[in-house]
Image (cartoon, helix red, strand yellow):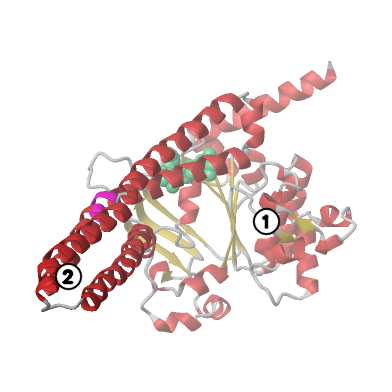
């Protein structure tokens, strides 16, 4: 009799194993297909206006429906297999009961087994059935969970390419101190820096930056100009170590950036990214990102320097004015000015503006540059721009072309020595002349 129980347990376990091994791959693809659905949904919600502007509504609907149908099909297939589990368990256990009764029949007749004992055995078998069903259902849940867990682990196991500086001495490193003690040390120095985004072994892979070398002394302003995609944003993202250079050396006040504590490094450097992004909350919460303990004086000074005073004055709630998700209640230029103010609140020693004046008119742009100088005369600045007018007053201008430096110097020097700079200058002055000519007519 015990043998019947052993065989039944083994048979049910085998059934569970076969069904699980068939459904597990389905659960994995199901999670991926769910990703696609949420991605399409997110794209369509955040880009609702673009979808409407290009009349893509119907096609996007179809794309969504396709994704949902794809998901449904896989879900149905896996459900069909999982659904076999309960009936299969029932069949095996009931067959076992039949065998049990059949085997005991003659024994009950001969009196070696009482009817009560037989009923007890059948009851044991039924109890086992309920327990096995619970276990089988648990397995379904575990299989789903393990598919999800392995995907979460993929994220957890991703190693950051940026390693923390090993040199602990630099954790208490002070910019002010080293500025005073080390004379003639450039605030930022690049030595033969090469960088590419994809780290494949393909030798022909194009470098986003090649052989970049320059020195920028403290309290100086450097402009970076060049065509779209020439590597301006890439160059400045190496300074706060958003990426590490493939070869060459980048130093800040004579210290290799790789030796810095990342927190110190990023406290010293204020970055205004090309794409202005603010988080939902109030304007003040956004401004305090760099320094939660900033005094009101500092905040107002930063706001005035960034030419954002009018924006805040025009809001009835002032600094407490709400910023909605994606800062949709602010214009492009307003967002840019607030991101500049946010960077200034942390009172950085080095300020990097990546095309941050692109949405500002010429007069505001000029006022911004002037007030940045008076905000902190010791602040080293890097201004990335497509406009000559934004960089022409810089102490040094780098002209980038296809990831290489094609010229460096002041505005006047470059006009004589750098062909590309001259071209940009001519195209922009012609534009201006054409505009003023048009106005006169
Ligand atoms: N995250 C990334 N992954 C892969 N390639 C990238 C990445 N970011 C930029 N690139 C590539 O590196 C090159 C330089 O891009 P970068 O953003 O530095 O240009 P840019 O000079 O700032 O242009 P723009 O004036 O339009 O802002 C481009 O060819 C771009 O395609
Ligand atoms: Mg850029």
Residue 404 visible somewhere in the drawing = no
For mark 1, give the secondary structure.
Answer: helix
Residue 232 in percent (x, y) is at: 50, 46
**Left or right: where does residue 301 sit relative to residue 50?**
right
- Residue at x-position 47% and y-position 60%: 239
Q: 55 above or below 83?
A: above
Q: Which residues are magenta?
A: 19-23
For residue 339, which numbered disc appears in the image? 1
Question: If the image is split into quadrants, where does the C terminus sit?
Answer: top right
The quadrant holding residue 319 is bottom right
- Quadrant of the snapshot with the N terminus: bottom left
Query: What number is the disc on residue 84?
Result: none
CB atoms of marks 1 and 2 within 8 Å: no
Answer with mark 1 or mark 2, whichever residue precedes in sequence: 2
Q: Residues within 10 Å of mark 2 (few under 14, many from 20)?
A: some
Residue 134 seen in the figure: yes
Which mark is drawn over residue 5?
A: 2
Q: Residue at x 65, y 69 (%)?
A: 346
| Disc 1: CA contacts within 10 A as few (<14), some (14-19) or many (>=20) | many
Tell me if residue 399 is in the magenta stretch: no
Which structural element holds mark 2? helix
């Amino acid at each position: 009799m015990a043998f019947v129980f052993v065989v039944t347990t083994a048979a049910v376990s085998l059934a569970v194993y076969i069904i699980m091994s068939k459904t597990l791959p389905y659960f994995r693809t199901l999670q991926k297909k769910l990703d696609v659905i949420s991605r399409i949904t997110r794209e369509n919600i955040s880009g609702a206006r673009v979808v409407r502007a290009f009349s893509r509504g119907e096609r996007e609907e179809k794309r969504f429906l396709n994704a949902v149908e794809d998901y449904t099909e896989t879900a149905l297939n896996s459900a069909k297999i999982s659904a076999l589990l309960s009936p299969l368990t029932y069949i095996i256990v009931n067959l076992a009961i039949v065998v049990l009764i059949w085997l005991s029949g003659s024994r009950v007749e001969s009196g070696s087994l009482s009817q009560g004992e037989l009923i007890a055995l059948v009851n044991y078998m039924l109890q086992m059935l309920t327990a096995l069903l619970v276990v089988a259902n648990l397995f379904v849940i575990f299989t789903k969970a393990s598919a999800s867990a392995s995907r979460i682990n993929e994220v957890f196991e991703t190693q950051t390419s940026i390693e923390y500086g090993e040199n602990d001495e630099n954790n208490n490193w002070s910019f002010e101190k080293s500025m005073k003690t080390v004379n003639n040390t450039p605030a930022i120095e690049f030595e033969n820096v090469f960088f590419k985004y994809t780290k494949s072994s393909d030798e022909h892979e194009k470098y986003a930056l090649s052989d970049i070398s320059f020195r920028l002394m403290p309290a100086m302003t450097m402009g970076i100009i060049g065509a779209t995609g020439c590597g301006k944003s890439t160059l400045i993202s190496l300074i706060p170590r958003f990426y590490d250079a493939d070869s060459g050396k980048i130093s800040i006040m004579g210290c290799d950036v790789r030796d810095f504590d990342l927190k110190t490094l990023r406290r010293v450097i204020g970055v205004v990214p090309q794409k202005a992004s603010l988080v939902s909350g109030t304007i003040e919460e956004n401004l305090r990102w760099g320094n939660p303990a900033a005094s009101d004086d500092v905040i107002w000074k930063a706001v005035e320097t960034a030419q954002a005073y009018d924006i805040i004055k025009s809001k009835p709630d002032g600094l407490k004015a709400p910023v909605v998700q994606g800062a949709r209640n602010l214009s492009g230029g307003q967002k840019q000015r607030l991101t500049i103010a946010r960077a200034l609140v942390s009172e950085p020693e080095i300020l990097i503006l990546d095309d941050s004046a692109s949405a500002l008119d010429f007069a505001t742009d000029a006022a911004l540059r002037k007030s940045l100088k008076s905000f902190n005369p010791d602040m080293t600045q890097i201004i990335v721009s497509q406009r000559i007018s934004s960089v022409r007053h810089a102490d040094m201008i780098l002209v980038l072309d296809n990831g290489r430096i094609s010229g460096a110097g002041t505005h006047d020097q470059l006009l004589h020595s750098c062909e590309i700079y001259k071209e940009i200058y001519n195209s922009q002055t012609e534009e201006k002349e054409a505009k003023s000519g048009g106005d006169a007519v």
